[in-house]
Amino acid sequence: MAKRSSLSIRIVEGKNLPAKDITGSSDPYCIVKVDNEPIIRTATVWKTLCPFWGEEYQVHLPPTFHAVAFYVMDEDALSRDDVIGKVCLTRDTLAAHPKGFSGWTHLMEVDPDEEVQGEIHLRLEVLPGARARRLRCSVLEARDLAPKDRNGASDPFVRVRYKGRTQETSIVKKSCYPRWNETFEFELEEGAAEALCVEAWDWDLVSRNDFLGKVVIDVQRLWAAQQEEGWFRLQPDQSKSRRRDEGNLGSLQLEVRLRDETVLPSSCYQPLVQLLCQEVKLGVQGPGQLIPLIEETTSTECRQDVATNLLKLFLGQGLAKDFLDLLFQLELSRTSEANTLFRSNSLASKSMESFLKVAGMRYLHSVLGPIINKVFEEKKYVELDPSKVEVKDVGCSGLHRPQTEAEVLEQSAQTLRAHLGALLSALCRSVRACPAVVRATFRQLFRRVRERFPGAQHENVPFIAVTSFLCLRFFSPAIMSPKLFHLRERHADARTSRTLLLLAKAVQNVGNMDTPASRTKEAWMEPLQPTVRQGVAQLKDFITKLVDIEEKDELDLQRTLSLQAPPVKEGPLFIHRTKGKGPLMSSSFKKLYFSLTTEALSFAKTPSSKKSALIKLANIRAAEKVEEKSFGSSHVMQVIYTDDAGRPQTAYLQCKCVNELNQWLSALRKVSINNTGLLGSYHPGIFRGDKWSCCHQREKTGRGCDKTRSRVTLQEWNDPLDHDLEAQLIYRHLLSVEAMLWEKHRELSGGAEAGTEPASPGEAPEDSLARLLRVLRDLREAHSSSPASSPTSEPNCLLELQT
C-alpha cells in the first residue's frame, strides 16, 4: 500500500512579457521547480514577447512536496539568463482545485528573500534552572541550502534570536550542507508569548549577507512538549512589504492538476481486473457489455485519460489487441457511413491513439527521425500558397537578382516532393520494424472494416481506416510538433514550422487516399499531386504487407523481441575520468554512447559499436544529482552502485541540459525501484582529497548529508507498466460515475431501487454490471480501512534523517 502523487503540467503560453534584449524583444523559456528542484525546462521561443510553448509533462513525486514554481527566463548567449518573473502554486492551492488549476496568472517579481530552500536540523529543550527555566537550542546541521555565491555554494551561519538577544554560530565556508553542532541557551519566562527565531544566512566579506531562510518556533508548544528534535523546513522572510508588479511582468497560461492516489495491494484489484478482462475476452458476445457502458458514462473531458488507463491495463494483461478489437466492433456497429468512420473522439479513437504512443513510439522515431532532422538542418524557405509567398533575393555568380514567385513555388514543390518521397520510402521499408502487437492490431482493424463495408465501392475504406490512425493521428501530429513527440529538443522556428506543416498536409492527403475532397480543399497543393498519387499506391502496398501477419508470425516476432532487452533510455553522455594521483590529480569527461535496459547500464564508443556493461541493474543503489561546484559543470548525475565484490562505487555522468538530466535520472530510478538496499541518503558532492566537497565530512563511507529523491520521476512513453496504479485510476473513474451505473443497473433489473446491494454469489447468478458494483463496494471498503487513506497533516519537522 502506498500513497502516490503526480502533477499533470501543461505550459501553454505567455503574453505581454517585458523586453529584456536591446532589440526590444526577449527569448523566453520556462523552468519548472518542485520545492526549488529544477525538473523541467521548456524550449526557448526566440524573439517574442508572447511565446507559445504548448508543452505537457507528467511528474511523479512524493506526497510531501510543498510547491511547484514556474520561472519565465530570457535566454542570453553571452551573459547570464535574465529572470522575467515567476508563478508559484502551493500544494494546498492545487488540492483546492480537484479538476485542476487552469487559466492565466500574472507573473510576480522574484524576491531573493523568498528564494529559499533546504532544511535545518535542530534540537530544542526546556531545562530547569536556578531562577528560571532555560531554553536550549542546539543547531546541528543543514542540508540543501540555496547556493548564493558564484562558486556554486554558500558560506552559511545561523543566527538565533529570542527576546531581543541574538547569538550566532560559526561560519562554514563553501558548503550547502554545513555541520555546526553548536548550542545556545536563553532564559525562559513562564507564559512568555515571544517566538524563537532561527535564521540561516550566507556570509559575504564585501556585500551584505544573503538570507537563506528561517524557522519560527512556538515556545508555548515547546514548553508543553519539553523537547523537540528534527529537520525543519526553512521558510522565506515575508515580514517585509514587497512591491508587487502584477501585470507589469506579463502573464502565463497554465494547466496544472494534482492527483493523490492511495494504491492498494495487487490482490485488492484482482476482482476488478479479472472482471474487465473477462468482458474483453467474451467480446461483443458478452452478456454484460461493461466496456460499452464505461464508454457511455465517460464524459468527453476525461475520455482520453480513461482510454489511456484501460489501454495500459489490458496491455499489461496481454489483451491490448483484444480490447481494441472489441472497440473496433462497437464503433463499426453504430457507423452507417464509411466516410465518418473513426472521425469522432470515441473511446476507440482515443484508445488507439494511446496505444500507438505506448507501443509504437520507437517505431515512429526510426521512420520519421532522419526526415525531421533533415528538414531542421536544411532550413529552406518552403511555401506553396501563392498568397503567402515571400520573394527573396538570391545570388547567382556574384550577381543578385530577385527570385520570382514561380521559382519560389517550384523550388518549394521540389523540396516537399523530396521529403515526402523519402518519408514514404522509409515507411515502405519499415514493415519488419513495426512491433508485432501493432501489426496484429491493424490486421484486426483492416479485417473488421472490410467485413463491415464489403464491395468494390468501399475498396479503399479498410486502408483509410488504418491510415486514419497511422497517418492522421500519429505521423502527421509528430511531423507538425516534433518536440512533443521527443523527435527534437527544441521547437521549430517559423520557417521550419511552415515546411513541417506542408509536409504533414501532404501526408494527410496520402493517408486520405487522395480523395477528391482533399484535392479541392487546398488547390495550391496541386504541384504535389504526382508524388501523392504515387504515395497512395506505395501506402496501400505497405498496409497490405503490414497486416499480412499470422498468429504464428506474431508469436515468433514477440518471442524474438522478448529475448532482446529493449533499451529504456539511450543516448550520448559524458563519463568522468580521473587521471593521476595526489595534488597532480586531474579529471575530465569523455563522451560515450550509453544504453539503459532492464538488465544493465552499458556504453560504447558509437551507437553501432559493441557495448560493454558498466553497471548491472540489480546493483544500483541510487541515482542523484551532483552539486555544480563539484566539477565546475552543471547537469552532472551520479549512479551509486556496488561492484561484483560488493564494494560501493560511483559513476559520474554529465548530460547536456536539465531535461536530459532529469530524463536519465527518471529512467534509472524507475528500473531500479524494486532493488534491495536502495539508499535513503547520499552525498551530492564528491570525495576530493580527504573530505566530501558538500559537507566536509572526512569519513568516505559515512552516512550521506542529503536525502535521496528516488520517487521524483518524469513520466515517459516507454515507462514500465504499473498495473496496480492503472487499476486504481480505473476504479477512481468508475467511482465517479457510480450513480449512473446504479441507474443503469436499476433499468436492467426491472426497477430495483438504486443503491440496493446486488445479490450475493450464492443467491442467484449475477450479471457483469452487478458484479462490477459489488467490486466497487469492496474496493471502497478496502480504501476506507487503509491507513494511507486517512488524511494526515504534515508535521512541522521530519523526525529523523531517512537512511
Image (spheres, grey):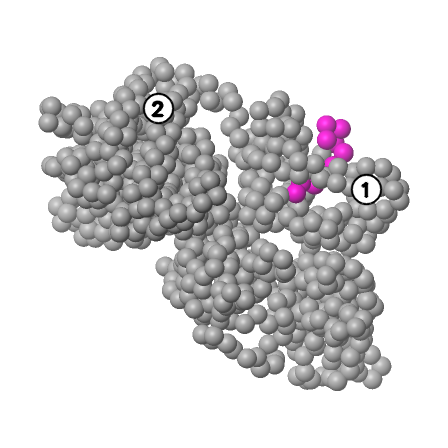
Q: Position of residue 629 (x, y in %)?
A: 73, 53
In the displayed structure, 231 sits above or below 373; it is below
Q: Residue at x 55, y 40 (%)?
A: 667
Q: Quadrant of residue 467?
A: top left
Q: Could you say where residue 383 lies in the image, as x and y percent from the top left?
A: 33, 45
Q: Which residue is mark 2?
A: 428
- Amino acid type shown at disc 1: Ser
Q: Which mark is residue 586?
A: 1
Region of the chain picked out in magenta, as a range: 643-654
Q: Earlier in the sequence, mark 2 or mark 1?
A: 2
Disc 2 from disc 1: Cα separation:
51 Å
Asked if 564 appears above or below 729 in the picture, the reply is above
Identity of the amino acid at label 2? Answer: Cys
In percent of width and height, residue 162 lies at: 74, 80
Identify the residue at horizontal 61%, vertical 49% (top origin): 709
Residue at image location 17% in from the left, 41% down from the top: 520
